[in-house]
Amino acid sequence: MNATSPDFSKGAAWQRGEYVPIAQASVTMTDWGFLRSDATYDVVTVWDGAFFRLDAHLERFLRSCARFRLDPGKSPREIIDILTHCVRLAGLRQSYVEMICTRGQPPWGSRDPRQAANQFFAFAVPYVWIADEEQRRRGLHVAVSDVQRIPAASVDPTAKNYHWNDLTMGLLGALDAGADTVLLTDAGGNVVEGPGFNVFALCGGTLVTPKDGVLEGITRRTVLELARVRGIVVAERTLSAAELRGASEAFLSSSGGGVLPVTRVDGQPVGSGVVGPVTTTLLQAYWDAHRDPRYSTPVEG
């Protein structure tokens, strides 16, 4: 690499028709994606040089765009090519790859979102774990917050969005209390989701995950598929905070780490207080699935 060559070693981004090192990536200050969190996004991971469930992530991204009346201005093939080139430029075998569509900016003085020119962005950086190695080994300590999740009638949780103030305030409270992360509840006191993850609890032999008020995570979908194949009884339904506290096992699911064990809720042990056998089985199955050609798309080139 000569002195004038861009350094993509920490990640690569695509913006406004060009590829730039991640440190140079930016969104225009007057873009409503910045000013109003008016945007959608999706994250697909690369593991051992292959995208994991790329088709599912791309389909959800385009569905989210349609839900928010956003147009990325790219075909699915064009998006895949941009994501792939970001990974290649950064030379990453394990990567966290994000695609974003923002509202853009309407003409000055206009408050009509239909007049805005939507913008597409993408980037690839080294793989992101939302729990460190020690937390994954011992299991996460989770607090259930009294901050309520934005209701689905206000913001559709099945379309990925950046309306995270409720999650952020809940997380700050949990961290201040000594927990590792947080789960928010709905108006009925049922656990829904946390910042960037879904939750599962083993209750009376049934693996339960919240059905309503949550993002339908691709990792969540994968866990449900893997559990059913292994004969584990699953239920998508409400999960009260009390039921979670009384579960024999619990874990989180996220692209940023897959299956992440939970061993304490609100300071009290979950089950025996150690990572349980069902969690261990599904954790291993999740990473094994990355070698399944049905789920993997090699990074071209």
Image: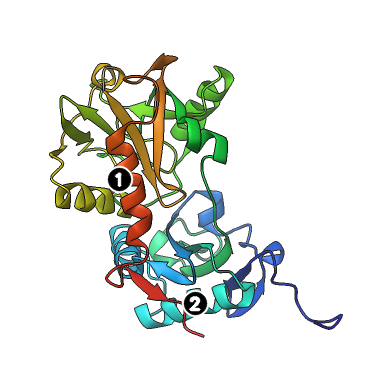
Residue 20, given in percent of the width and then of the height, sits at: 67, 73
For the residues labelled 1 and 2, the Cα–Cα distance comes to 29 Å
Drawn side of residue 190 relative to residue 133, left or right: left
Say which quarter of the image contains residue 145. Answer: top left
Upstream in the sequence, badge 1 or badge 2? 2
What is the crowding at mark 1: few (fewer than 14 residues within 10 Å), some, or many (at least 20)?
A: many
Residue 170 drawn at (x, y percent): 47, 26
Local packing at callout 2 (Cα closer than 10 Å; few below 14, some 14-19, many 20+) is many
Percent x, y for residue 54?
Answer: 36, 68
Residue 50 appears in the picture as rendered:
yes
Circle 1 residue: 282
Q: Quadrant of the N terminus?
A: bottom right
Does the image show residue 155?
no
User: Compared to 124, does 133 lie above or below?
Assistant: above
Hey, which residue is sitting farthest right in the picture?
3
Amino acid type indicated by mark 1: Leu
Quarter location, residue 263: top left
Residue at x 41%, y 78% (from the top left corner): 74
Q: Which of 136 and 170 lies nearest the eye of the viewer?
A: 136
**Residue 194 image offset from top left, x and y in percent:** 40, 35
Q: In the image, is 257 to the left or to the right of 242?
A: right
In the displayed structure image, the side of residue 59 where residue 107 appears, left or right? right
Name the residue at 45% across, 31% down: 139
> Does the CB distance between marks 1 and 2 fall below 8 Å?
no
**Residue pictured at 56% horizontal, 59% vertical:** 31
Q: Amino acid under label 2?
A: Thr
Check disc 2 and report the residue beneath it. 84
Q: Residue at x 26, y 38 (%)?
A: 213
**Element at badge 2?**
helix
Number of marks in picture: 2
